[in-house]
Image (tube, rainbow, N blue to C red):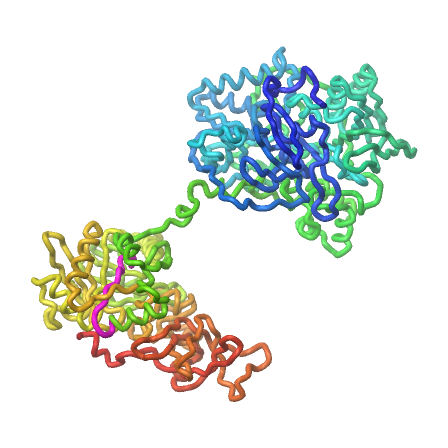
Amino acid sequence: MSRIKGYGRIDRTRTVAFTFDGVAYTGHPGDTLASALLAQGVHAVGTSVKFGRPRGIGAAWVEDPTGLVQIEEPFPEPMLLAATVELTDGLVARGLAGQGRLAEVADTARYDRKHTHCDTLVVGAGPAGLLAARSAARRGERVVLVDDRADAGGSLTGTEVIDGRPSREFVAEVVAELAAAPEVLHLQRTTAFGQYDDGFVLALERRTDHLGTAAPRNLSRQRVHRIRARHVVVATGAHERPVVFADNDRPGIMLASAARDYLHRYGVLAGREVVVFTTNDSAYAAALDLEHAGARVTVLDARPSAPEHWAALCRERSIAVRPGSAVVGTTGDRRITGVDTVTAGKAESLPCDLLLTSGGWNPAAHLFSHVRGALRYDPALGAFRPAEPVPGVSVIGAANGTFDLAGCLRDGAGDDAPATLAEPETAPLVLWRTEGDPARQFVDIQRDATVADIERAVGAGLRSVEHIKRYTTIGTAHDQGKTSGVIASGIVAELLGKPVEDTGTTTFRPPYTPVAFAALAGRERGKLFDPERITSLHSWHVAAGAVFEDVGQWKRARFYPAPHENMDAAVLRECAAVRGGVGILDGSTLGKIDVQGPDAAELLDRLYTNMMSTLKVGRVRYGVMCGNDGMVFDDGTVLRLAEDRFLVVTTTGSAARVLDWMEEWLQTEWPDLRVHVTSVTEQWSVFPVVGPRSRDVIAAAFPHLDVSNEAFPFMSWQDTEVDGVPVRIARISFSGELAFEVNVNSWYARAMWLRLLSAGARWNITPYGTETMHVLRAEKGYPIVGQDTDGTVSPHDLGLVWAVSKKKRDFVGKRSFSRPENTNPERKQLVSLLPADARTRLPEGSQVVEFRPDGALPPPPVPMLGHVTSSYHSAELGRPFALALVKGGQSRIGDTVHVPVDGALVPAEIGGIVLVDPEGARRDG
């Protein structure tokens, strides 16, 4: 065991059982999986992704590039860092070979989000961040303080003295003051993983991960905080940087600060025979602390002379200090057993079971970079630090390159900074790597990327570190280059013979640490991820055995199969019933937008290609909307309800888009128009009653309504009522048959549906679904926007030239109609295709090619004429047919083309788009 008495902040009175790689171990509450494994002497936790080399625990927190594990219990979760997994009773984990696997069972945990607004957001509860939060709270500001560790204090170990007392006592005092402040929200275990414009920060709170199976079921496991702050203070500290040398990837090699953290936070001494390889003063504190805990320590300082202050302290503890020394290699298998060193040109090997490295510190300025904050290279630090300030963002403490405790306290509290002992500091040495075989010098240990990989990238002509990053994959693993990124920049600069400031560094982007998709989804999972919308008759459709399809977010009945019927048989039966008798459809999902105001007619004139202002009250008009490019955007009908009021009916899938389109023009281009638009889609249920007997059904259901052609002409509407319930009926047909659309308040939808079914029972009224609706409309050549169009189709291409007004001065898309390409006779145009064998149903999406007498495709590339947009079996025609977009289609009617189907060429004749009742006689019954 490597637990040291008198060290650590864990609860040693209780024991926690866990399993790693099939072996049972114990730890204590407050441990991480990494600290518990190190306490048991387990250093190797997995193997590398490319070379299969042993990998261990390299750091104590998110900067660890190596310690990846797969959690199996309490819930399978891949690729977590052992250093960040808080130990829970019953935890089961295993080491990884660089890659994890997704869970095979559903995640039953809850996730949610919360919106928070504040004056000041402080990210990081180290000494600078704590005092910045306290200062803001004392000014009366609303403050949010977030920190990713389990407790506040950052890297303070407790050995420091602040205001005359141990630093942990000082931290507890500040935390207590913040807790007592009513306008302060203090969140530990919360990682700010992304900063965006206007003070918007996303932070992930791990609310119950540390509780394991004891977590209350009513609490979310993780919560995403969406924080809006007037001012953001970045106090995120710094990441210690290693030095690259041969075989620097062995288990038992870690950052010096990590070994110190494991000792003071968890009471774990990570090794007994310790070598510390450093280029700066900070590693001396780790050497002294580990020696005090019982380790034998040797310090190798790469600088020509050791700092006298620290060297004197080491001499008092019998710690050997060797200035001018460097590690050039290591030995060992599952754990390091020795280091190869060079001191003043003399090679030597030293035995050890732990090698600590410290090549300096990189400010953790990621959040600053997220809002395009520029970084500049500081030669004195050998690191990149924030340059020009960003409005609304302050960077303080080690995140800004201030690495001494006194300086961090001043950054956080200004003139009110508490007193602390100032320690002398010697300039660090900037050292990216030592001599050795480049193929064995690992820059990104997780990616198995070496100095040799960088040399190959530079040799291939790459000069930008962004390009080299992608060529070598350095910095693309879970840690996003926290320890490897700046080193890679330094090595690139050396190879190119350029200053590091000229090579720069790669761009930091959100997220700062990996975030589970489940946390980002929050409660929008399963059916709530893409909300399912259902009509008021949904339960009736379910009871009737309907098969549903998704149309936008709506669940629509696709067809109603009788026993032993497949879809084709059911649709043929439904089509025959509508064409020969009467059918009824639930069309409630059609978009319905109420347009009101003195300028309502003017708005619609500007948006539709045809004239709407001339529409009379009580009448209906078909209309087409185009985008700025003149391509069809949506189509539908417009009912004029009053001089200043219209009801716009859109396609189901485009309802929200059309409403947004209207609002965009009203709010940004035509704010002078006095118009209000409101969605009433859910308020009105619509039931088209269709077929030769539809007039009889409507007459029976509404005996006081005159439904004759003279009293109720096509494309008109009338209001009536049933038992005091208002009903609006419109004569609109999407099938070419006599049809009436019954509109009623959705509260009364079921009653009205049952009334229509009862009234039509005498004529065997047949409910039909969307598939039958598609067949009926295609037989009449009525296009469906989004199926027969693809964003490159104009009204003229669809044969809707009659719907484009030549009288209107302007409308959205009008200018585009005059573009040469839009008048090209070889544009793809909507036509019908009739397979010559009268048996083959052409698959939708199939390509259309020129007819080949030999029945064989020409060698690639094969010229394409167009593609099939809709294809169905027709009960009325007694054969399959299709609609297609074909180049110059209208001028090719009567021609034969080929359609490749299952490796064979199927001949098909091009025809007009109206295949049933071209005279339109059925429309009036």
Quadrant (top left, top right, bottom left, bottom right) of the N terminus: top right
Q: Is residue 879 inside the magenta stretch?
A: no
**Magenta-colored stretch includes residue 586:** yes
Quarter occupied by residue 312: top right
Place of residue 103 in the rendered image (x, y in percent of width and height, measured from the top left): 55, 44
* Residue at (51% x, 75% y) in the render: 902
* Residue in the image at 81% along x and 36% along y: 332
Residue 305 placement, left or right of 358: right
Q: Locate residue 552: give its quadrant.
A: bottom left
- Is residue 681 visible in the rendered structure shown here? no
Q: Which of 470 and 490 is in front in this view?
A: 470
Residue 428's spot in the image, x, y percent?
76, 30
Magenta residues, start to end: 578-590
| Residue 762 shows in this picture | yes
State the quadrant of the C terminus.
bottom left
Q: Residue furthest front?
A: 564
Q: How many labels does the image show?
A: 0
Q: Where is residue 611 in the image (x, y as percent from the top left)?
A: 25, 67
Note whether 81 is above or below 553 in the view shown.
above
